[in-house]
Image (cartoon, grey):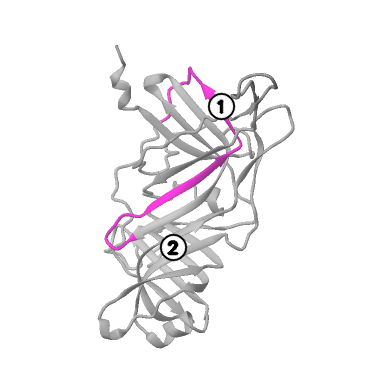
C-alpha cells in the first residue's frame, strides 16, 4: 500500500544569512523567503565517473566518485524586506524614514546594492511528514527579477551551495510561513531617463544577475565544496525591458548614439501614500542599449522590447511601520 498522503508535501523552507561564512546558521521564526509558488527540485547529487576494465563487457566495470555540486532554483513572490537579497547582490542597508517630519517614521527602508563579495546563507528545507531536513550551507545565488504591468513581481534565486547536511530526525521547524499580504504589483509604469528627462515608460521586464558561481572542493578529503567562487565579469547584469517611447529624439540617442540612461521601476501594494510607503523599487544605472528597435509614431502606441546592459543595480524595499 502506497503512502499517497506524501503527494501533498508538508514542506517548510527558510533562509538565514550566515554569521560566519560557510558555517550552518540556525533558522528562526520569520526567516521566510516569500510565497513559494513553484515546485523546488532539491539537489542531492552523487556523480560517478564510469571506469572500464580491459577484457570485460562494454559497460562500466567500476565507478569513481566525483565532486558534488549543489545547484538549484527557488522562485519566490516577495512580500517584504525579509527576503535575503544580499546573498545575490552583497550589501543590505536598513534605515527608517519620516516623510512628513512629524517625528514618527512612516516606513523602514532596506536597500540592496552590489558588493565585491557576496554574503552566504543557510537554506533549510524541513519535510515534517517524512522527518526529513536538508540544510544547504554556504549558499550564494544569482538572481532573475521578472515583472509586468498589472502582474505580481517574481524573483528566482539561482542557488549554488558549498555543501549539504542531511538530517532524518530533525527538530520541529520554526514558523516559516509568511504573513498573508498582497504581493508587490506592477500597478505603475516605470521610467527610462537621460539626465533626468524621460524618454520612455516601462511596462515590465526581466533582469538577471549572474556571478558565474561554482562550488570549489577544498582538498580536505571530501567530495563537497570548500567554498563557492564568484567571477568578476562584464556580463554580470543583463536586462530586457518592455518600453513605450515618449520622446523619439532622446530614444534615438539611446538606440543609435549609445547614450547611457537610467531606469526606475516601482512595484507596490498601497497607492494612498505619496511617497509610497509599501513598495519594491528597482533601479538600473548607466544602461547601454544593446538592441533597441525604433517604432514609428504612426503605428500608435507601440511597446518595444529593448535589450540593455546595466552598469549597476539597486533594489529598495519599503515596509510600512
* Residue at the extreme right: 219
> Start and end of the magenta stretch?
148-174
Which residue has dot 2 on it?
Answer: 282
Closest to the observer, 140 or 18: 140
Q: Quadrant of residue 113?
A: bottom right
Q: Residue at x 49, y 67 (%)?
A: 284
Where is residue 302? Give x, y as percent.
29, 76
Mark found first going from the N terminus, 2 or 1: 1
Which residue is at a point 35% across and 41% down the rendered structure image? Answer: 38
Give the quarter of the image for residue 144.
bottom left
Q: Secondary structure at mark 2?
A: strand
Is residue 26 covered in magenta?
no
Q: Residue furthest front?
A: 55
Taking the image as drawn, is residue 177 in sight? yes
Q: Residues within 10 Å of mark 1 (few under 14, many from 20)?
A: few
Q: Is residue 50 left or right of residue 243?
A: right
Mark carried by residue 165: 1
Q: In the image, is residue 163 above or below residue 282? A: above
SS state under label 1: strand
Mark closer to the observer (2, 1)? 1
Q: Can you tell which mark lies on residue 2?
A: none
The N terminus - image quarter: top left
Residue 18, quarter of the rendered image: top right
Q: Vertically, is 24 above or below 235?
A: above
- Residue 195, image x and y in percent? 49, 82
- Find out whether residue 162 is within the magenta segment: yes
Q: Cβ–Cβ below 8 Å for labels 2 and 1? A: no
Residue 280 picture location, percent across and down:
39, 58
Which residue appears at 45% of the width and 69% of the height? 307
Counting other residues with Cα less than 10 Å from the Cα at mark 2, is it few (<14), some (14-19), or many (20 or more)? some
Amino acid at each position: 500500500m502506497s503512502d499517497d498522503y506524501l503527494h501533498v508535501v508538508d514542506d517548510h523552507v527558510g533562509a538565514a544569512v550566515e554569521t560566519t561564512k560557510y558555517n550552518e546558521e540556525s533558522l528562526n521564526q520569520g526567516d521566510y523567503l516569500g510565497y513559494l509558488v513553484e515546485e523546488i527540485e532539491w539537489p542531492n547529487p552523487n556523480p560517478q565517473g564510469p571506469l572500464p576494465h580491459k577484457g570485460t563487457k562494454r559497460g562500466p566495470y567500476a565507478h569513481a566518485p566525483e565532486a558534488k555540486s549543489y545547484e538549484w532554483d527557488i522562485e519566490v513572490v516577495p512580500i517584504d524586506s525579509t527576503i535575503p537579497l544580499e546573498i545575490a547582490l552583497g550589501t543590505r542597508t536598513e534605515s527608517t524614514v519620516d516623510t512628513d517630519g512629524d517625528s514618527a517614521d512612516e516606513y523602514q527602508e532596506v536597500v540592496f546594492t552590489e558588493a565585491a563579495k557576496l554574503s552566504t546563507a543557510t537554506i533549510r528545507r524541513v519535510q515534517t511528514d517524512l522527518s526529513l531536513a536538508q540544510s544547504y550551507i554556504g549558499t550564494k545565488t544569482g538572481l532573475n527579477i521578472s515583472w509586468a504591468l498589472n502582474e505580481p513581481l517574481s524573483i528566482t534565486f539561482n542557488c549554488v551551495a558549498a555543501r549539504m547536511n542531511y538530517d532524518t530526525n530533525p527538530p520541529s521547524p520554526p514558523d516559516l510561513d509568511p504573513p498573508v499580504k498582497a504581493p508587490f504589483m506592477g500597478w505603475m509604469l516605470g521610467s527610462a531617463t537621460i539626465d533626468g528627462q524621460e524618454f520612455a515608460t516601462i511596462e515590465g521586464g526581466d533582469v538577471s544577475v549572474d556571478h558565474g558561481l561554482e562550488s570549489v572542493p577544498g582538498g580536505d578529503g571530501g567530495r563537497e565544496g570548500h567554498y563557492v567562487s564568484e567571477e568578476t565579469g562584464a556580463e554580470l547584469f543583463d536586462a530586457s525591458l518592455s518600453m513605450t517611447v515618449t520622446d523619439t529624439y532622446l530614444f534615438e540617442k539611446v538606440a543609435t548614439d549609445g547614450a547611457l540612461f537610467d531606469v526606475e521601476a516601482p512595484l507596490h501594494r498601497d497607492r494612498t501614500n505619496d511617497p509610497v510607503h509599501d513598495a519594491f523599487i528597482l533601479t538600473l544605472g548607466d544602461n547601454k542599449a544593446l538592441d533597441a528597435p525604433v517604432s514609428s509614431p504612426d503605428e500608435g502606441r507601440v511597446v518595444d522590447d529593448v535589450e540593455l546592459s546595466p552598469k549597476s543595480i539597486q533594489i529598495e524595499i519599503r515596509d510600512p511601520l
